[in-house]
Image (cartoon, rainbow, N blue to C red):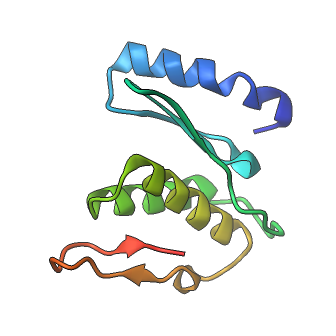
Amino acid sequence: MVANQVGQAPRLAADLFHRLGPDAAIVTLGRFGALAHTTRGLLRTPAPTVTVVHTHGAGAAFSAGYAQTLLAGATLPEALHAGCTLGSAHCAGSPVTAIQPTPTPNGGPCVIRH
């Protein structure tokens, strides 16, 4: 997403939220992070600054970090942060093992911590 499109993202997220009715409408912003529109309002998370090697698969990496963290019982802000962290690490060419998953106390899915 280019800088002039980032300003349009909140409106896009709100439109998706109201048209589709999800718990949260997520819009990724590339190097600018991601945002979520929920019933409580808008939440924005920045992406870590990295030297980008490639962007192919960045959205999938974001989605993996976001979904895994939510499934582990984390909050929306934690999940957005994990998605941005994993997406950025992927774009920097870092292996997935650079972000260590932490087992949850109940033996459930791991939470991505940084």
Locate residue 45 relative to residue 110 in the image: left or right. Answer: right
Seen from the viewer's position, the closer of residues 19 and 80 is: 80
Q: Is residue 94 above or below residue 87?
A: below
* Residue at (25, 72) in percent of width and height: 109
Locate residue 114 relative to residue 103 in the image: left or right. Answer: right
* Residue at (37, 23) in percent of width and height: 39
Q: Position of residue 64 (x, y in %)?
A: 44, 61
Q: Is residue 82 above or below residue 7?
A: below
Seen from the viewer's position, the closer of residues 91 and 3 is: 3
Position of the N terminus, as image quadrant, is top right
* Residue at (73, 46) in percent of width and height: 32
Seen from the viewer's position, the closer of residues 97 and 41 is: 41
Q: Position of residue 81 (x, y in %)?
A: 54, 57
Position of the C terminus, as image quadrant, is bottom right
Q: Residue furthest left?
A: 106
Total label count? 0
Locate residue 89 relative to residue 52 in the image: left or right. Answer: left
Q: Position of residue 106 (x, y in %)?
A: 15, 77
* Residue at (46, 62) in percent of width and height: 65
Q: Is residue 18 above or below residue 105?
A: above
Locate residue 92 relative to residue 71 in the image: left or right. Answer: right
